Image (cartoon, helix red, strand yellow):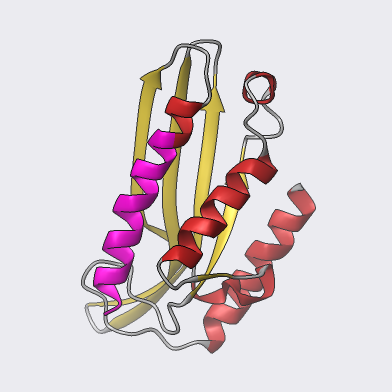
Amino acid sequence: MRSLLLTGLILFFGVNLLHGQIFSETGLEVENHEDIYVVLLGIDEDEHALNIGITENRVRSRVNVRLRQIGLKPATIEDSGKGYLTINMTILPRAFNIALSFTRGVTFFSEDEMYLLMGATVYERSITGQFSGSSDFIISTLDQLLDQFLSDYLDAND
């Protein structure tokens, strides 16, 4: 998993140099925004998540369906050069945290110098909460975070 993530980040940085950046007001504007690569962290390594039925496959399926419902397409790691969405879940016996972030390359100017940040996090939201032991509340919280991100992402790219 780590080698796949490392390969993805290398591809992201390399492809980012080849893609031009469009002017950004929110940080979420990207070219060809219809494809979005999703990185999931912490799920299959978390015994508490597995105990309540939250697996990487379940979360990935949920996210992919949500993307397709609004006309976006889950991208492959090879297409991640314009940015990627990271979902990091930590689940304890009665508490959880879901962090969602969008990372992309950013070019900016300062005092007539141009700077390029290869992996700048331009969007970040998280929710920490308690739950009764069922995965339903955690999944609905993930849905809330996805709704807000997808709304902001589509607004930025219209």
Q: Is residue 119 visible?
A: no
Q: Is residue 94 above or below residue 58?
A: above
Q: Residue at 53% across / 78% down in the picture? A: 16
Q: Is residue 110 above or below residue 68?
A: below
Q: Quadrant of residue 71?
A: bottom left
Q: Position of residue 56 (x, y in %)?
A: 67, 41
Q: Count all numbered tags in the image, as a single digit.
A: 0
Q: Residue at 58% across / 71% down in the picture? A: 80
Quarter of the figure with the C terminus: bottom left
Q: Residue at 64% across / 42% down in the picture? A: 58
Q: Is residue 19 visible?
A: yes
Q: Is residue 52 above or below residue 69?
A: above
Along the line of sight, which residue is nearer the eye, 92 or 135? 135
Q: Position of residue 60 (x, y in %)?
A: 61, 50
Q: Is residue 37 above or below residue 93?
A: below
Q: Residue at 51% across / 51% down in the picture? A: 86
Along the line of sight, which residue is nearer the eye, 125 or 74? 74
Taking the magenta stretch, the answer to whether it contains residue 154 is yes
| In-image side of 42 versus 65 (left or right) | right
| In-image side of 158 versus 74 (left or right) | left
| In-image side of 21 versus 118 (left or right) | left
| In-image side of 48 versus 153 (left or right) | right
Q: Position of residue 156 (x, y in %)?
A: 26, 72
Q: Quadrant of residue 131?
A: top left
Taking the magenta stretch, the answer to whether it contains residue 153 is yes
Q: What is the magenta range?
A: 140-158
Q: Position of residue 34 (x, y in %)?
A: 46, 77
- Which SS type dominates the magenta stretch? helix
